[in-house]
Image (spheres, helix red, strand yellow):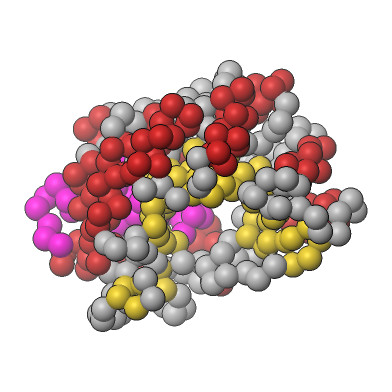
Amino acid sequence: MGTAPLRDHSLDGGRKAGALIDPQGRCLDYLRLAVTDRCNLRCRYCMPDTGVPATAPGETLSFDELTRACAVLVGAGVRKIRITGGEPLARRGVVEWMGELTQLAPGLEILLTTNGVLLEEHLPGLVEAGLKRVNLSLDTLDPDTWKLITRREGFAAARRSIDVVLEAGIGLKVNVVVQPGVNDHEILDFVELTRERPMAVRFIEPMPFSGSDTMDIPPVSGTWIRERIASAYSIRPLHRGQGDVDCRFGIDGHAGTVGIIEGNSRSFCGDCRRLRLNARGELRTCLYGSPQADLREALRSGATDPQLLALIASAVGRRLEDGHAAEAAGEGAISMARIGG
């Protein structure tokens, strides 16, 4: 479909409109950046029992290469970068590098998604680096269920992350993948966490990214989750911001909020503003789609910044309408750890 148009003018309200625009007119200003595909857990909905093949060190983008790719994207209008993995804190030096990343542009928002096992020891450095919000992946409040889901130890540290993040005074969202017969009975327990704590709990439909050819977890709909919450609480819809992937709800008497992410239903595709870059330099314009550009090859073959931008813009120009179309044109079974969070 050709190259997406680029608009070039100065910062406006914290956003530089040199933004990449896809064929549907969506402005892609949010990057999910995986700094590693290694993880200290083996969550059953993310990867197969045996894990995923380890990426050789030389195949992973260096911090200098990651910074350069981010600089080009920020110059094109990306205003939010979420650091993911695998488990991002498993990569040595990532905290210090995140501090450098915040210097790319005034107002650039650097966020982190983590499973929390390593978070407490790194949190002071992350706060010093300028981190404003953490997304914590925590699917259960029960240590035995944790071990069943993750196939690893570490529950106490992950659970403690809720309190240490809030004590640090930064924003917190807890993401819960709802798994029928495993943790669906804990939905109301998670909602109750928001009664006294100014945090968000977001319930996520399971998605088919375990690396298997079939969906390993029975599907559950966002509608069912919402009805389960509404059966016990008086909920009210909250404003859904542009580009938000969750339907948010307030609850009378609660300091925090709840949300539902209909990732498998793909109800938010029409307003999705995300790009994904994994640790091997593969750029995706849709979670459900195949890589659309190899930035590692371009970076290592001497591409200039304008050439990198043209490669990215061309990928954005081929972006399909929604996740259903992207999946139909995609590469088949793949692990979420390989996609990049």
Residue 244 position within the rendered picture, expressed as x and y whole percent measured from the top left: 56, 64
Q: Position of residue 55 (x, y in %)?
A: 33, 31
Q: Residue 67 appears at what percent x and percent y?
A: 23, 50
Q: Nearer the viewer, residue 168 or 57?
A: 168
Q: Quadrant of the N terminus?
A: bottom left
Q: Is residue 194 visible?
A: yes
Q: Quadrant of residue 193?
A: top right
In this rendering, would 299 be left or right of 51? left
Against 54, residue 15 (above or below) is below
Asked if residue 30 is positioned above or below residue 332 in the image, the reply reads below
Q: Is residue 254 left or right of residue 327?
A: right
- Left or right of 334? Residue 44 is right
Give the residue drawn at x 31%, y 29%. Answer: 92
Check the image and name the residue furthest to the top. Answer: 153
**Residue found 26% across the figure and 81% down from its top:** 9
Read off the magenta span.
276-305
- Asked whether 99 or 4 is in front, the reply is 99
At a point 39% along the width and 52% down the height, the residue shown is 110
Among the 4 quarters of the image, the one containing residue 17: bottom left
Q: Position of residue 327 (x, y in %)?
A: 53, 57
* Foreground pick, 211 / 232: 232
Q: Is residue 287 magenta?
A: yes
Above or below for 202 versus 90: below
Closest to the observer, 185 or 280: 185
Q: Is residue 334 visible?
A: no
Residue at 74%, 67% (x, y): give it: 237
Task: Determine whether, in the image, residue 306 is placed left or right of residue 5.
Answer: left
